[in-house]
Amino acid sequence: MEAKKLTIHVNIDNLLLPMTVTDTEQEAVIRKAASNVNQQLITVRERYKSVPNDRYYDIMVMLNSEIKALTAENKNDQSPVYGILDSLEKEIDELIKK
């Protein structure tokens, strides 16, 4: 059975955006994300009062969000740990065989 879809509206920088959600958890994440974006816009507007046009603020927020996402992704990358564990397992296996 297909999950029930609901359309919600979130307000980002006085622009209402329709979003489709399937559950209250997803809705909460989207609303929190919208709130975070609005707060970031406020922050960059206060910090950088003279930019050529308002689009710069949008770009700064997008760039900052992507930097945070990539940084978090890299922190969660466990492959180096697994590589070390694989090497240690091989060394231990060789020692046991001797």
Image: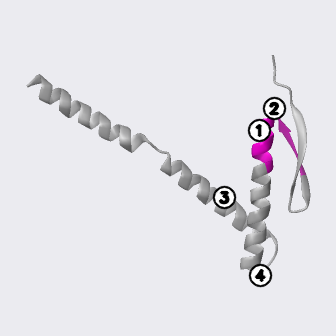
On the image, numbered disc 4 is attached to which residue? 49
Give the residue displayed 12% in from the left and 23% down from the top. 97
Q: Distance between the residues labelled 3 and 4?
A: 20 Å
Instruction: Identify the amino acid type marked 3.
Output: Ser
In the image, which is nearer the foreground, mark 1 or mark 4? 1
On the image, numbered disc 1 is attached to which residue? 26
Report whether residue 90 is seen: yes
Based on the picture, tell me whether residue 29 belongs to the magenta stretch. yes
Q: Could you tell me if the residues under marks 3 and 4 are in contact, i.e. CB atoms within 8 Å?
A: no
Q: Quadrant of residue 29?
A: top right
Give the residue displayed 60% in from the left and 59% down from the top. 67
Instruction: Identify the amino acid type marked 4.
Output: Lys
Q: Could you tell me if the residues under marks 4 and 2 are in contact, i.e. CB atoms within 8 Å?
A: no
Q: Could you tell me if the residues under marks 2 and 1 are in contact, i.e. CB atoms within 8 Å?
A: yes
Q: Circle 4: is it few (<14), some (14-19), or many (20+) Cα within 10 Å? A: few
Q: Which tag, 3 or 2, sits closer to the chain's start?
A: 2
**Can you give x and y, in whole percent of width and height, for residue 39 in the image?**
77, 64
Q: Could you tell me if the residues under marks 3 and 2 are in contact, i.e. CB atoms within 8 Å?
A: no
Q: Is residue 28 left or right of residue 93?
A: right
Give the residue displayed 89% in from the left and 34% down from the top. 6
Q: How far apart are marks 1 and 4 (CA)?
A: 34 Å
On the image, numbered disc 2 is attached to which residue? 22
In the image, which is nearer the foreground, mark 3 or mark 1? 1
In the image, which is nearer the foreground, mark 3 or mark 2? 2
Q: Which contiguous range is marked in magenta? A: 17-31
Q: Is residue 56 left or right of residue 65?
A: right
Instruction: Identify the amino acid type marked 1.
Output: Gln
In the rendered image, which quarter contains the N terminus?
top right
**Can you give x and y, in whole percent of width and height, for residue 46 in the image?**
76, 77
